[in-house]
Image (cartoon, rainbow, N blue to C red):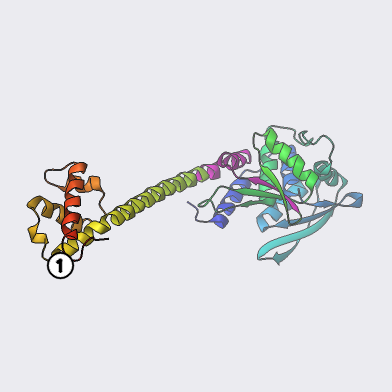
Amino acid sequence: MVKNMKDFTLKVRQEILSHRPSTVCCRRAMLAGILINSECGLDGTVYIRLCGRDCTETARKLLFDVYGLETKPEYSSCYGRLTAEGVVVSEKLSSLLSEMKNADNISAEPSFFRCDKCRQFFAGGLILSSATFSDPEREERVEIRLLDPVTATKINAFFQNSGLFPSMSVRKGSNNLLFKKNDYVEGLLGLAGAGKSAMELIEFGLVRDLKKDMNRVSNCEINNIASATKAATPQLKAIEKLRSFGGFDLLTEDLKITAELRESNPGASLSELCSMHQPAISKSGLNHRLQKILEAAEKIGGGKTD
């Protein structure tokens, strides 16, 4: 089991990268997903900026395999993350990426999907370059960050066609697709070919639910004990008063037994206190005895016990 967000994100990326696209159309689809936030300029110029060496090196290999392009990215550190930047010139690549920025026919499937596996590799590329996972021990949540609003709308339509329905938000100049429901997060991983990671998320969810149930039971027990202790306070003060003023020995044997059980078990409920008697007594019988103890304490040592 992974232990935090960083470990889980790394595990997802490794699982996606373990499935290499074998056909040209799948390589093209994965490359389109990885380069989804690249900017297209004039004359086929494409400005690329990626985070992470594994994502960058995968993009380099795909650029060469699909378009024969050699790239030499410049690496730098940005807020503690390894970032790579580069520029390539390819009208075919520019046309491929520009399709996702075209507002015409928003809900249509990308034209570069040529086989059933293209969807998987496109989703995998999106996750590699643009997805951020929350700590799975706390919640299941994935955010896909997209710079262009039209692209975000088209990607949202792609996911909806796949049975996933993320919410959309705009924050800090980017358009984000948020997967919050467990089924959607697990479905996203399954779509991208990260089935093992999806199963691990299900395990995390079971552990989270178990912890919530345990906390709920624990809180309920604590509240019950606190309530029982609060209710027992006047009874305990009455017993203490009887002992202090010599009235305890004047109680009947039954009342002494009840008083001693209450002293020994201040947090016990009335039902629990009933079962502690040998033989057990009824709740009305217990209330009668406790009332007698309170009345006995009121008659000595200064009156009523609060």
Per the image, label 1 sits on a secondary structure element best described as helix
Q: Is residue 221 visible?
A: yes
Number of disc labels:
1
Q: Amino acid type of disc 1?
A: Ser
User: As drawn, is 17 to the left or to the right of 297?
Assistant: right
Q: Position of residue 115 (x, y in %)?
A: 71, 32
Q: Tell whether 156 sits left or right of 225.
A: right
- What residue range appears in magenta? 174-200
**Residue depicted at 82% across the width and 57% down the height:** 87
Is 190 included in the stretch rendered in magenta? Answer: yes
Query: Looking at the picture, does residue 117 appear above or below residue 48?
Result: above
Q: Is residue 34 magenta?
A: no
Q: Quadrant of residue 249?
A: bottom left
Q: Can the viewer see residue 23?
A: no
Left or right: 153 as drawn, with respect to 43 = left
Going 73% across and 56% down the picture, which residue do you hit? 50
**Residue 113 image offset from top left, x and y in percent:** 75, 35
Q: Residue under label 1, please give it.
A: 244
| Residue in view at x 67 percent, y 58 percent | 53
